[in-house]
Amino acid sequence: MKLTFICLLLAAAAWGHHSFAAEFDGSKVMTVKGTVTKFEWMNPHSYFYLDAPDASGNLVSWGIQSRNLSILSRQGWTKNTLKPGEVITVTFWHHKEPDRNIGFAQTIVKADGTTLDVQPGR
């Protein structure tokens, strides 16, 4: 009975996870510079949000997905790695729907030049 329960639990967890390719365009890489408005340190993926000007100078809000806490922690991240008000430049894969301001982070460069490689070894 315990084994059945564990198998069902694992199957539910696998079902809830989505693939990168289902949501993001691996051929469309973008870079934006903006101000962090929020950093959500949570599983299954952390998220951060930033406001960045577009080509016309209008402020656009972006939601950027990152890795899970286990991976980020091993890379030295903490819940304080990104702070609201901090200016960053982020390179990311854009969402498959071009009108959505959503991405999956590759690298982040802080104002002091510190580079955070979200996808090491890619």
Image (cartoon, grey):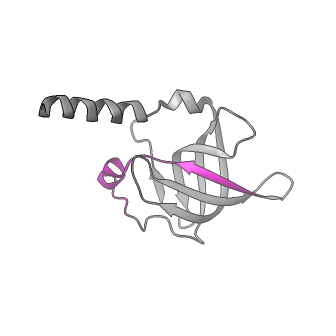
Can you say which quadrant of the picture contains the C terminus?
top left
Examine the image and state in which quarter residue 96 appears.
top right
Side (left or right) of 47 relative to 80: right
Front-most of residues 110 and 34: 34
Q: Work out whether 116 lies above or below 27.
A: below
Answer yes or no: is residue 113 visible: no
Q: Work out whether 17 lies above or below 82.
A: above
68 in the magenta segment: yes
Answer yes or no: is residue 72 visible: yes
Which x, y percent locates residue 119?
44, 41
Identify the residue shown where x is 69% and y is 61%.
Answer: 51
Side (left or right) of 3 relative to 58: left
Examine the image and state in which quarter residue 86 appears.
bottom right
Residue extending furthest toward the right: 56
Side (left or right) of 16 relative to 87: left
Identify the residue shown where x is 63% and y is 60%.
Answer: 50
Identify the residue shown where x is 63% and y is 45%.
Answer: 102
Examine the image and state in which quarter residue 35 appears.
bottom right
Query: For the magenta stretch, what is the residue range?
Result: 60-78
Residue extending furthest toward the front: 1
